[in-house]
Image (cartoon, rainbow, N blue to C red):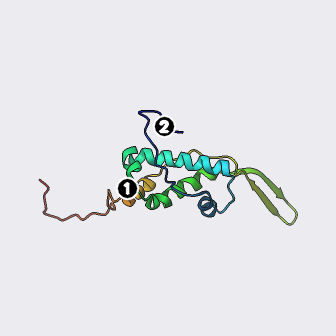
Amino acid sequence: MPAPAGASEISEAELFTLPELDAWAQTSVPEATGTLVRELVTTLIRTEVGADRYDALVDLSPLKPVALDVARRMLRNADGRRSVALQLDDFSETVTYASETLAAPFLTSDDIARLWLALGIRRSGAFTIRPGCTVQ
């Protein structure tokens, strides 16, 4: 279905595939959940770098590590515990994690720096201080 007139087009390329998400998260993510996570991460990154810049990219692979890190964080429930069972005699602890709940997508300051670095727009934050030099 064509986009309505005046609507911005989102790049057809994908930041990552669902099998890549499974491998990165080390879990089997249901297809609907993986698709939602990919869409939310794509929107987040597209917003950060700017729609025009993102849509002009032919190769999204430099952004993939950051995108997969954000997606993996989404799949991890902050504490993630659905239930905890403790036994006293011959102590044992069983923790069941709730993997079907998603955290909100967010970019850390490190993620943002890595995105811009991957796009070749900003260099690393290293700098040199030269005593006696002045900036005019």
Q: Judge whether 108 appears above or below 1 on screen.
A: below
Q: Name the residue tied to disc 1.
A: 116
SS for dot 2: loop
Q: Quadrant of the N terminus?
A: top right
Q: CA distance from mark 2 to mark 1?
A: 29 Å
**Residue at position x 48%, y 46% in the image:** 44
Q: Residue furthest front?
A: 1
**Residue named by callout 2:** 3
Which residue sits at x=83%, y=64%?
91
Q: Position of residue 26 (x, y in %)?
A: 65, 63
Say if mark 2 contacts mark 1, CB within 8 Å.
no
Q: Secondary structure at mark 1?
A: helix
In the image, is residue 12 above or below residue 4?
Answer: below
Q: Residue at x 67, y 55 (%)?
A: 29
Amino acid bearing label 1: Trp
In the rendered view, does 33 fall on the left or right side of 91? left
